[in-house]
Image: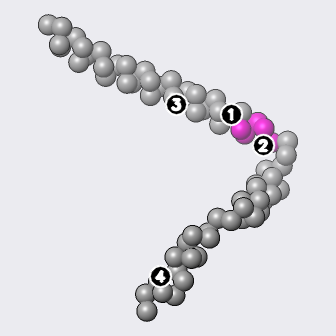
Amino acid sequence: MNRTEAGGSAVIRNALEPWHLLIVALVVIFLFGSKRLPDAARSMGKSLRILKSETRALKEENEEPSEQTHNK
């Protein structure tokens, strides 16, 4: 008998029910506190913006040399 016959795929399919996400959210709020969560979200947003601008700059930097070699 393999996993799918024993109901293994049903366990994987039902791994994240909405009430699981609610429990995770409550645990996060309990651990970090409702006052620290907005600050954490704000700093995470700033970090993502910095990462996005850096990746854009790297992409533009990589495109410039290839355009210069084509123009010569």
In the rendered image, residue 10, in percent from the top left (x then y), is placed at 57, 76
Image-quadrant location for residue 67: top left
Front-most of residues 20 and 7: 7
Between the residue at mark 1 and the residue at mark 4, the CA separation in whole angstroms equals: 43 Å
On screen, residue 59 versus residue 71, left or right, reads: right
**Badge 4 local density, few (<14 within 10 Å), some, or many (20+)?**
few
Tags 4 and 3 touching, CB below 8 Å: no
SS under mark 2: helix
Residue at the spot of label 1: 43
For badge 2, the amino acid type reads Leu
Say what amino acid the circle numbered 3 marks. Leu
Q: Which residue is mark 3?
A: 51
* Residue behind mark 4: 4
Q: In the image, which residues are magenta? A: 36-41
Give percent across and percent down for residue 24.
Answer: 73, 60
Q: Main secondary structure of the magenta part?
A: helix
Residue type at mark 4 is Thr
Q: Circle 3 sits in a helix, a strand or a loop, which is it?
A: helix
For the residues labelled 2 and 4, the Cα–Cα distance comes to 40 Å
Specify which label sits upstream in the sequence, 1 or 4: 4
Instruction: Residue at 52%, 87% (x, y): give it.
Output: 6
- Judging by the rendered image, the residue that carries numbered circle 2 is 37
Foreground tag (4 vs 3): 4
Q: CA distance from mark 3 to mark 1?
A: 12 Å
